[in-house]
């Protein structure tokens, strides 16, 4: 929400390297701080344990030992992290979220639908896991295939760049040893002096992108090839020899390819390529295959662990980890020499290393303090490509245009300022609350009046004049692409910019042609992206382009309440029309009862808002007052039925999750042999029956991550007592801010709510984008020699 005080707070957060972007896992117990995963399991998003939830991080097979994967109680190490930047995902327990983070971290704001395996179901270590390896083409597969085209173009451009520049910073101690060990694979250049997020980078001119056709709508040829029957049979035999569940054969073959059986025989720890498998289980499998030779220091084991830990970090939103954090996590998994294991992985180029200066530049002859970051190639390439692309748009802009007449005709001062800024710059950021969304829309309307080709892209569907970012990237909607594979437009306005992860942002920016304009607009205080990175916060922190802060406050008591939350204050607001109502409850059962009563009776009667326009939001999926329990009670009241279509009936309100991070509201129409038929904003879609469990869930009650980018006339936020640990300032801000006219808070967390608003900040993410942008900007300002 937008007030002057909050604008100042947002600016301060943007300058903070930790940033204001939320870890989609919210206040979930970080792997670095987690208890023994073989002991008591954390609650499922503030509810009962349910690690199979696809709304959460990648499922972890905590109970897989019972299915034959070894480890046993106490086998998983306990980690107590220091809570620093980049540390959280490095520990050994990326368990299912205790918050609605789930909705994200599948790199995830992950899918917002879970496999219908039932309350407390085990993760996909059984037959359900095989669905991921085969099955019919889905919208998600088509979308991912279209994005793959963009990533390949990015990779092609990166491959044609100039070679790395020799690093100029002087190192000592462990940093020098690590740097020397990886000189052949290091790509750092002498960086500009800057703080935490600054990264060594030099301006590099991208080679012309090869022509690429416009990504087509879903096509069967784009679907990932299913593993061959021979490959699955070969893997099944290896799994049987190691005492692992044969149901993992499909997922393993899909992850490792046709040579999976041989690869798994030679390195049993490659079993960790399946998201549901944990290191303790892979250790048990390796011991069964290799015997006493499967020790904790086995080079095969340590190499896989390094990659696995970085992948888990990505699920938490990080694009890299500090080397010390990674070494600590390796030690927690019993690796005898973590530093040597990390150096070996870097030397083999399985991971990349970066060094960043800390503090201001030092005098000649002095040693520059640095931090060593380690990351996987995919995230590193996307982050560098994104930085290059943003710098390209800022640098290739043709010059100011005369839009003064359009600015003078703008509906308000903030819109006029935005129009003037975009007239003179190729890259502009815009921050503000829900009411401020009208300003970039006014800009788009003015640009169209000037004859420009304009596209507005948002995170969630629903805007009359906008498309979703996912649909734009997949080619399903939007302006299409020219012969060079770039969008045929002059101005791209991106709403909900905090929801951009580095990969989607890189693909998006790559599609914007030289000389075109890009506007990134959003509210920095909402929950962050589902995937890795903190793109919007990093761009704000870099301060390398004009930043417009809206002066438009969100109206009414709801706007006043949410604006206070944004600056850490839970204020009592005057609501004469009962725009904000607090409903105290004693237990979860009462919370469910009151929520149903509010949706079905109280809100429709008092405000004339139909029940279908009332949205329930709660921190988690599990528990006695999570989305499952609430949806069951709401269905019984609003659309009772036997659930004859896999638990669904015609008329059921659902959310469809075609890909991680997207929760699309829909209504069940019917079902047949083809699948479940849904109506999504007037568009009929069919979800194949083998994907219904993982992509569709009831939608009367959802989590805050699923709700980001959308608003409803009335919202009921349910806070049962067991949700106290799931609350954070950005979660409360996001949940409360989804209400347009009325907000009811079913309140059972006592003082945990004001404490969360005042003290529980978003979890920091370790990223490199801010430093890359600063370095490119500094280099661009230097005169050519």
Image (cartoon, rainbow, N blue to C red):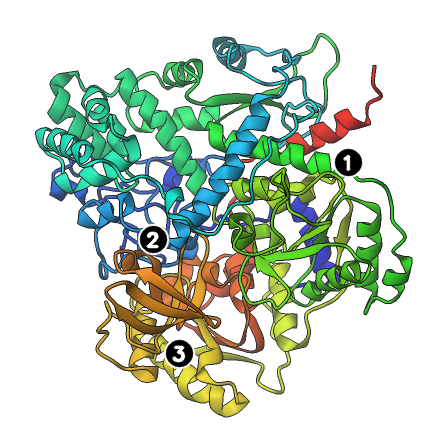
Which one is closest to the eye, mark 3 or mark 1?
1
Q: Which mark is residue 595?
A: 3
Residue extending farthest to the bottom is 605
Q: Give the residue drawn at x 75%, y 60%.
A: 550
Nearer-N-terminus badge (1/2): 2
Instruction: Give percent across and percent down for residue 715.
Output: 50, 75
**Quadrant of the rendered structure where residue 652 is?**
bottom left
- Cα–Cα span, label 1 and label 2: 42 Å
Instruction: Classify mark 3: helix, strand or loop.
Output: helix
What residue would you read off at disc 2? 54
- Looking at the image, which is closer to me, 29 or 664? 664
- Looking at the image, which is closer to me, 152 or 347? 152
Nearer-N-terminus badge (3/1): 1
- Cα–Cα span, label 3 and label 2: 25 Å
Say whether marks 1 and 2 touch (CB < 8 Å): no
Q: Which mark is residue 113?
A: none
- Cα–Cα span, label 3 and label 1: 54 Å
Residue 613 lies, with reference to residue 12, above or below; the image says below
What residue would you read off at disc 1? 396
Q: Is residue 383 left or right of residue 192?
A: left
Instruction: Classify mark 2: helix, strand or loop.
Output: loop
Residue 367 lies, with reference to residue 426, above or below; the image says above
Which one is closest to the eye, mark 1 or mark 2?
1
| Residue 620 visible in the current orientation | yes
């Amino acid at each position: 929400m937008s007030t002057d005080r909050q604008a100042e707070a947002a600016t301060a957060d943007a300058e903070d390297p930790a940033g204001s972007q939320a870890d989609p896992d919210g206040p979930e117990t970080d792997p670095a701080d987690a208890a023994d995963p073989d002991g008591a399991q954390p609650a499922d998003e503030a509810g009962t344990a349910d690690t199979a939830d696809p709304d959460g991080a990648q499922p972890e097979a905590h109970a897989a030992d019972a299915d034959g994967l070894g480890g046993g109680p106490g086998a998983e190490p306990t980690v107590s992290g220091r809570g620093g930047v980049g540390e959280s995902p490095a520990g050994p327990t990326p368990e299912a979220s205790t918050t609605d983070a789930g909705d994200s971290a599948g790199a995830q704001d992950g899918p917002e639908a879970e496999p219908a395996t039932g309350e407390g179901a085990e993760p996909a270590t059984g037959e359900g896991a095989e669905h991921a390896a085969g099955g019919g083409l889905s919208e998600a597969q088509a979308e991912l295939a279209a994005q793959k085209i963009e990533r390949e173009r990015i990779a092609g451009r990166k491959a044609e760049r100039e070679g790395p520049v020799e690093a100029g910073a002087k190192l000592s101690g462990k940093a020098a040893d690590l740097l020397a060990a990886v000189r052949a694979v290091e790509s750092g250049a002498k960086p500009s002096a800057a703080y935490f997020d600054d990264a060594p980078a030099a301006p590099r001119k991208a080679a012309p992108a090869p022509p690429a056709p416009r990504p087509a709508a879903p096509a069967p040829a784009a679907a990932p090839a299913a593993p061959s029957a021979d490959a699955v049979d070969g893997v099944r035999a290896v799994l049987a020899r190691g005492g692992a569940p044969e149901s993992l054969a499909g997922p393993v073959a899909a992850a490792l390819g046709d040579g999976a059986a041989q690869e798994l025989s030679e390195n049993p720890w490659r079993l960790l390529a399946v998201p549901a498998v944990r290191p303790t289980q892979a250790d048990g499998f390796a011991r069964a295959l290799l015997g006493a030779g499967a020790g904790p220091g086995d080079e095969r084991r340590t190499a896989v662990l390094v990659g696995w830990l970085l992948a888990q970090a990505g699920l938490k939103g990080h694009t890299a980890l500090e080397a010390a954090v990674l070494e600590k996590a390796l030690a927690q998994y019993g690796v005898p020499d973590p530093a040597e294991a990390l150096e070996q992985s870097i030397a083999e180029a399985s991971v990349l290393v970066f060094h960043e200066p800390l503090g201001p530049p030092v005098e000649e002859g002095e040693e520059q303090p640095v931090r060593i970051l380690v990351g996987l190639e995919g995230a590193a390439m996307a982050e560098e490509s994104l930085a290059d692309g943003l710098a390209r748009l800022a640098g290739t802009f043709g010059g100011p245009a005369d839009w003064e007449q359009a600015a003078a005709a703008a509906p308000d001062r903030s819109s006029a300022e935005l129009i003037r800024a975009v007239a003179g710059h190729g890259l502009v950021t815009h921050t503000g609350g829900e009411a401020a969304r009208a300003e970039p829309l006014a800009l788009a309307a003015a640009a169209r009046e000037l004859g420009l080709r304009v596209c507005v892209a948002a995170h969630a569907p629903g805007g009359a004049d906008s498309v979703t970012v996912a649909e734009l990237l997949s080619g399903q909607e939007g302006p299409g692409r020219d012969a060079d594979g770039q969008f045929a437009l002059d101005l791209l306005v991106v709403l909900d910019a905090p929801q951009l992860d580095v990969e989607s942002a890189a693909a998006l920016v790559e599609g914007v042609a030289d000389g075109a304009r890009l506007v990134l607009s959003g509210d920095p205080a909402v929950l962050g992206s589902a995937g890795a990175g903190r793109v919007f916060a990093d761009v704000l922190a870099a301060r390398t382009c004009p930043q417009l802060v809206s002066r438009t406050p969100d109206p009414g008591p709801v706007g006043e309440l949410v604006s206070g939350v944004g600056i850490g204050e839970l204020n009592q607001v005057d609501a004469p029309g009962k725009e904000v109502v607090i409903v105290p409850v004693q237990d979860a059962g009462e919370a469910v009862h009151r929520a149903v009563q509010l949706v079905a009776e109280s809100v429709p009667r008092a405000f004339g808002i139909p029940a279908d326009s009332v949205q329930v939001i709660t921190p988690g999926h599990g528990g006695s007052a999570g989305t499952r329990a609430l949806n069951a009670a709401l269905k019984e009241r609003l659309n009772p039925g036997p659930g004859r279509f896999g638990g669904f009936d015609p008329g059921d309100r659902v959310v469809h999750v075609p890909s991680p991070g997207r929760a699309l509201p829909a209504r069940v129409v019917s079902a047949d042999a083809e699948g479940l038929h849904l109506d999504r904003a007037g568009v009929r879609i069919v979800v194949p029956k083998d994907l219904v469990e993982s992509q569709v869930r009831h939608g009367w009650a959802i989590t805050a991550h699923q709700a980001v980018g959308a608003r409803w006339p009335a919202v009921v936020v349910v806070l049962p007592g067991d949700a106290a640990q799931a609350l954070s300032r950005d979660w409360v801000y996001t949940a409360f801010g989804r209400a347009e006219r009325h907000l009811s808070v079913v309140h059972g967390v006592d003082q945990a709510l004001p404490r969360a608003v005042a003290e529980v900040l978003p979890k920091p993410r370790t990223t490199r984008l801010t430093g890359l942008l600063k370095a490119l900007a500094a280099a661009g300002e230097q005169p050519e020699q």
